[in-house]
Image (cartoon, helix red, strand yellow):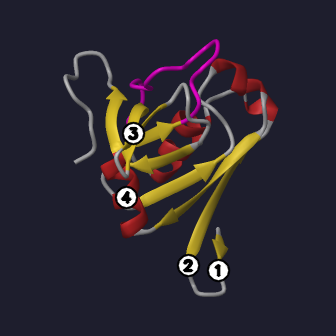
């Protein structure tokens, strides 16, 4: 964990290319014990899809709306995630694709209610687990 001069605590997650797993499903969500929404660039081979096998799910954000402008994950190269029910926001540098398993990368997380609310409210569509009709954050 890192502490800012102003007292804000940040948690850094990093993976080596030999980790061979998904950053959010296999490290962030399990360590923080939270279900997550991940918005990463999904415009290539090997999209992982939602992770629904563990105690904490990871959903892919498909569409956002910010200030009236719509973004889809295939045209948005940002990489961030939010917890489903608490004010955790993570900003990172790796996509949720199988090709990324062999790459190092990471994300930096902070607990901030206003920032989390802004990201949460922007989510318009997410890929859910099988059998779920909707999985938008509440």
Asked if residue 113 can be seen in this view, the reply is: yes
Gap between marks 1 and 4, in whole Å?
22 Å
Residue bearing mark 1: 4
- Tag 1–tag 4 contact (CB < 8 Å): no
Mark 1: secondary structure: loop
Query: Mark 4 or mark 2, which is nearer the start of the sequence?
Result: 2
- Earlier-in-chain disc, 3 versus 1: 1
* Dot 1 or dot 4, earlier in sequence: 1
Q: Is residue 127 above or below residue 123?
A: above
Which portion, as a residue range, is magenta? 40-57
Q: Please report whichever mark, 4 or 3, sits nearer to the chain's N-terminal start.
A: 3
Q: Disc 3 or disc 2, which is closer to the eye?
A: 3
The verdict on residue 54 being magenta is yes
* Main SS category, magenta section: loop
**Classed neighbour count for the residue bearing mark 2: other residues with Cα under 10 Å, few (<14), some (14–19), many (≥20):** few
Helix or strand or loop: what does disc 3 sit on?
strand
Q: Which mark is residue 8?
A: 2
Secondary structure found at label 2 = loop
Give residue 118's mark.
4
Identify the residue under disc 3.
64
The answer to whether residue 57 shows anywhere in this view is no
CA gap between label 3 and label 1 equals 30 Å
Depth-wise, is mark 2 or mark 4 nearer the camera?
4
**Are the two marked residues, 1 and 2, in contact with CB atoms closer than 8 angstroms?**
yes
Q: Gap in Å between the C-alphas at discs 1 and 2?
A: 5 Å
What percent of the width, then of the height, locates residue 22? 61, 31
Up-down relation of residue 64 to residue 6 (above or below):
above
């Amino acid at each position: 964990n890192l502490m800012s001069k102003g007292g804000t605590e940040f948690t850094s997650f990093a993976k080596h290319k030999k980790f061979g797993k998904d950053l959010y499903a296999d490290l962030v969500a399990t360590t923080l014990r939270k279900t997550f929404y991940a918005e990463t660039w999904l415009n290539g081979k090997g999209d992982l899809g939602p992770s629904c096998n563990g105690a904490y799910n990871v959903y892919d954000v498909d569409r956002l709306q910010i200030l009236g402008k719509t973004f889809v994950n295939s045209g948005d190269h940002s990489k961030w995630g939010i917890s489903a029910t608490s004010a955790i926001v993570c900003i990172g540098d790796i996509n949720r694709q199988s090709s990324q398993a062999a790459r190092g990368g990471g994300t930096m997380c902070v607990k901030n209610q206003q920032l989390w609310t802004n990201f949460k409210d922007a989510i318009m569509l997410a890929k859910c687990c099988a059998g779920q009709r909707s999985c938008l954050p509440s």
